[in-house]
Amino acid sequence: MKKLALVCQRNAKLPFIFEAAQAANIELVMIYDTTESAPTQHPAAVTSTWQLPVFDNPELALDTFATGVKERNIGGVMTLREEAILWTALAAKKINTPSIEPEVAALTRNKYLMRQAFAKAGLRTPGFFYIDNPEDLSQIQALDYPLVIKPVSGWASAGVMLAKNSAELPDLIKAVWNVQHKDMARFNDKNKPVGLVIEQYLPGKEFVVECFVDTAGVHVLTVGDKGQPEGPWFEETIYRQRRDIDDPLIIALCEAACSGVKALGINMGAAHVELRLDANNLPYIIEIGARIGGSGVSHFIVEQGTGISFAKLCMNAALAEPNPNLPDILPAEKVAANYIIPLRGHGRFSGFLGLDKVAQHPQTARTIIFFETNHTSPPPPAFGGYPGFIFSVHNSNEEARNYHKWLDDTLSIIWKHHVYQ
């Protein structure tokens, strides 16, 4: 049986990568950072865990990993975690197994360098500046408000905030600066300057394109509608698969995504491409992660919609195992979707209203809850985690939209002393 090292999986409650490995007859060795706890019960396909100082002492972790790989019979290494992408690429190079180059991994982990690569390739990307001093905002005057402020080594929407005018910009920059240099300090690339990216806000809808790259090129596995997050902190809410791959907008999104993947030099494995439309419905590349999105959420979307196991493709690639030939764009038979339960507040978590109704709905495929009673969620821009995900499968885009509207009206979080609607 083939054995794969899975690095720093963020949440073992999301079962998709483990189920996919089990179905593919692949054993997983879960590598955890020394500050993190391994699950008391091994998920499906996991035969052992291994704690290494991945973030606090990456060089020691690499040496220990390389020394212990043969004894553990590990034939490859991969990650679904944004912060661990660079270490994973270095680990693969150390043991001579397939991966993107460490230089490419570092590029995908730095929002400023990534945007420079997009601009150099002539791709549409929002106007941007990099700042390494929160007191010096002089160059930002060249951009028009509103502006989006992002930690240069952030992930998802953690630490991201919207400044609507110059009056509120300085305080918001200081807030995001604190997130970058305190909350995210362990994950910063020690070889690169660490500041903030300030970029032009785009008013249109947000999309994601899931790609898989092999020797034949970049393949689009699915296109997802991410709604229209407007700030001030861009809380993620939905992911709805699009079946209409012949629509001119979807074609344009796919072309932009594939160009972005090539511009960064991603030559194998997964690419999670985030895009947004401008006022004229033209797609702009926002950023690209060299991973399966959402700790495995993107695998669910692809597999339920198309029948293709996204995770198996990536695991096979990391193990130097063959994969089937893929079309340029995979057709979707169903519409898979994920609903990220909105916070609508912060404080001490006490439970949900309406969750029982959600579980009984015929279109609900899975309900996965992350928050436990008394979990404390801080106010933005700090990120205290997602409350939970509601997964569903539908016959049409309209059915998926209606289901998410129903969830908006039915489900809410109970915070201690308050219910935020």
Image (cartoon, rainbow, N blue to C red):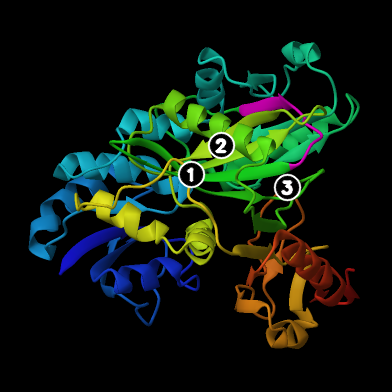
| Marks 2 and 3, how far apart at CA | 31 Å
The front one of 59 and 356 is 356
**Above or below 105: residue 302:** below
Q: Dot 1 lies on which element? A: loop
Say whether residue 33 is visible: no
| Marks 1 and 3, how far apart at CA | 36 Å
In the rendered image, residue 201 lying in the magenta stretch gets the answer: yes
Amino acid beneath label 1? Ile
Residue 60: percent from the left, percent from the top?
A: 24, 46
Residue 57: percent from the left, percent from the top?
A: 32, 46
The front one of 248 and 159 is 248
Between label 1 and label 3, give the one nearer the viewer.
1
Quarter of the N terminus within the rendering: bottom left
| Residue 329 marker | 1
Residue 118: percent from the left, percent from the top?
A: 54, 21
Residue beneath disc 2: 254
Q: Residues within 10 Å of mark 3 (few under 14, many from 20)?
A: many
x 64%, y 64%: residue: 338
Q: Is tag 2's residue or tag 3's residue first in the polypeptide sequence? A: 2
What range of the chain is rendered magenta? 196-205
Mark 2 touches mark 3? (CB < 8 Å): no
x 60%, y 40%: residue: 274
Amino acid beneath label 3? Pro
Mark 2 touches mark 1? (CB < 8 Å): yes
Q: Is residue 410 left or right of residue 103?
A: right
Q: Is residue 140 left or right of residue 410?
A: left
Residue beneath disc 3: 381
Between label 2 and label 3, give the one nearer the viewer.
2
Q: Is residue 356 left or right of residue 112?
A: right
Q: Is tag 1's residue or tag 3's residue first in the polypeptide sequence? A: 1
